Image (cartoon, rainbow, N blue to C red):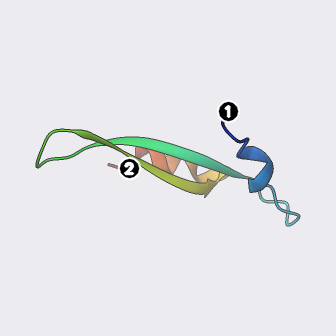
Amino acid sequence: MAKKVVATLRTTTGKDYAKVIRMVRSPKTGAYTFRESIVPNDQVKDFLSKK
């Protein structure tokens, strides 16, 4: 079973984080790869809108 990531991303500083997984297509082979990043909750929309 998969581990629960959300519990480990919480800190006492008051800023909550989210693990974001984005699918990116390789221009060389055309295959899809996955990019994982941990970003603050208020920057999730900005991260997903970037290309």
How far apart marks 2 and 1 lie (CA) works out to: 32 Å
Q: Which residue is mark 2?
A: 50
The quarter holding residue 10 reads bottom right
Most extreme residue toward the front is 1
Residue 9 drawn at (x, y percent): 74, 55
Residue at x-position 15% and y-position 39%: 30
Identify which residue is drawn at 66% across, 37% down. Answer: 2
In the structure shown, which secondary structural element does the residue marked by tag 1 occupy?
A: loop
Q: Determine which residue is flagged by label 1.
A: 1
Give left or right: position of 33 versus 10.
left
30 to 27, vertically: above or below: above
Q: Is residue 31 left or right of residue 4?
A: left
Q: Nearer the viewer, residue 49 or 35?
A: 35
Q: Do labels 2 and 1 touch, CB within 8 Å?
A: no
Counting from the top left corner in percent of width and height, residue 17 is at 70, 53
Amino acid found under the numbered disc labelled 1: Met
Compare residues 3 and 5 and report the one nearer the observer.
3
Task: Name the quadrant of the N terminus.
Answer: top right
Front position in the image: 3 or 39: 3
Who's the residue at 65% across and 48% down the image? 18
Residue type pointed to by label 2: Lys
> Which x, y percent locates residue 45?
53, 44
Can you name the residue that lies furthest to the top here? 1
**Circle on res. 51:** none
Which residue is more in the foreground, 48 or 21? 21
Indicate the secondary structure of the residue bearing disc 2: loop
Q: Residue at x 73, y 41 (%)?
A: 4
Seen in the picture, residue 23 relative to 41 is either above or below; the reply is above
Q: Would you call the spot at circle 1 few (<14 residues within 10 Å), some (14-19), or many (20 or more)?
A: few
